[in-house]
Image (cartoon, helix red, strand yellow):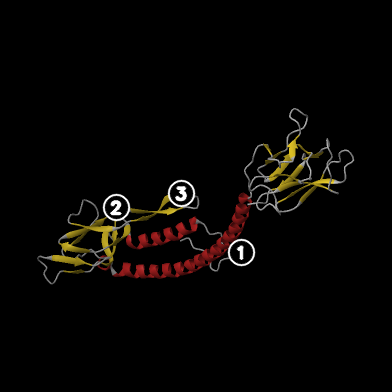
Amino acid sequence: MKKLLSPLPAGGFPFTVEDLLNLQDEVYRSIYALYGTVGASFVVSGCTTSNGGNPFGGNVVVTPGYVWLNNELRYFPGYSGAFPFHIVPDLDVLETRTYANGAVQNSYRTSPAKASRTAGGGPSILFNPGTSQRLVPLINASEAATRKAADDVLTDGLAGEIEARVQAIQELSNTLTTLQIQLNTLTNTVNTKVTRVRAATPWTNLVLEPKWFPFPVGSAFNPPQWKQNEDGFIHLRGLAITNGNPYDSLIASLPLGYGTRTFVNIGGYRLNNDPYQSVRVSAAAQGETSGIFYEINPTPVIGSGQSLSVFLDGISFYNDLP
């Protein structure tokens, strides 16, 4: 008989499906060693009969029990009806389980017994209304003593093996709990990153404020435009000009949901010895939209025939709006 060492060495027993199968098979081989040579078919336990004291007619009631049929220990659910009748093998019942990969597969087989008015040509136990095919009468005193000794050895061995398996299962459960916590943490991290993925957009013309205009069509400069990448960064490009007074620093606003709640200041270009210039992108005063502002200090007064120009090329920022 294959048995686990007891006590098991420390370090965490590597519990596998093979260990469960070994436990099942060793028990079955032990049962077969006890019952397989006694007879082809007999009652192991239960299956007591009553028929109201009438041995010649009426119905018989048989309680549930276990029987040995066709080299299998089978459960018999009981019977109430006419006699004589036979206990015969019933069809196997398969049970499924959902595996870790999501597949639903057969995993357990149950071999029951049932009542039949005929023997059916195979192994059977006759009740008329009782039966002589019981385990104890079929075993002589020597075989009974041998069976008891074997039962004692089997019980002691199984007790130690079951204890070791329970310990191994507990260690496995602890490991699985730790792995589940780590998996939950990783899942939350991935979900957080997934929610930040943004839809990419093509280059799109900005809707400029009334006092701002794109550079003349056909020039070497792009019109004021924006686009968003999948990584959530918004990029600007193009050249905008203004020649209106009073001076309005708001060039354009991005569509709803695109922009940043933080101030983004980017140093701008100097044209015609203008004072210090910069471009600022902010949603602070625009609700859930971001305004693109042209900052110049001091505020200019634009004379007749004069204009101010601002390059948006190279301006990028992360979209942190919902």
Q: Residue at x 42, y 59 (%)?
A: 24
Task: Point out residue 216 in the picture as x, y percentages from the top left corner.
Answer: 75, 31
Q: Residue at x 68, y 45 (%)?
A: 254
Q: Which amino acid type is marked by label 2?
A: Leu
Q: Is residue 298 left or right of residue 72?
A: right
Q: CA distance from mark 1 to mark 2?
A: 44 Å
Q: Which amino acid type is marked by label 3?
A: Ala
The residue at which mark 2 appears reads as 91
* Rendered image: mark on residue 229: none
Q: Nearer the viewer, mark 1 or mark 2?
A: 2
Q: Quadrant of residue 118?
A: bottom left
Task: Point out residue 284 in the picture as x, y percentages from the top left corner.
Answer: 71, 54
Front residue (pair 13, 304):
304
Q: Residue at x 56, y 66 (%)?
A: 8
* Rendered image: mark on residue 11: 1
The residue at which mark 3 appears reads as 103
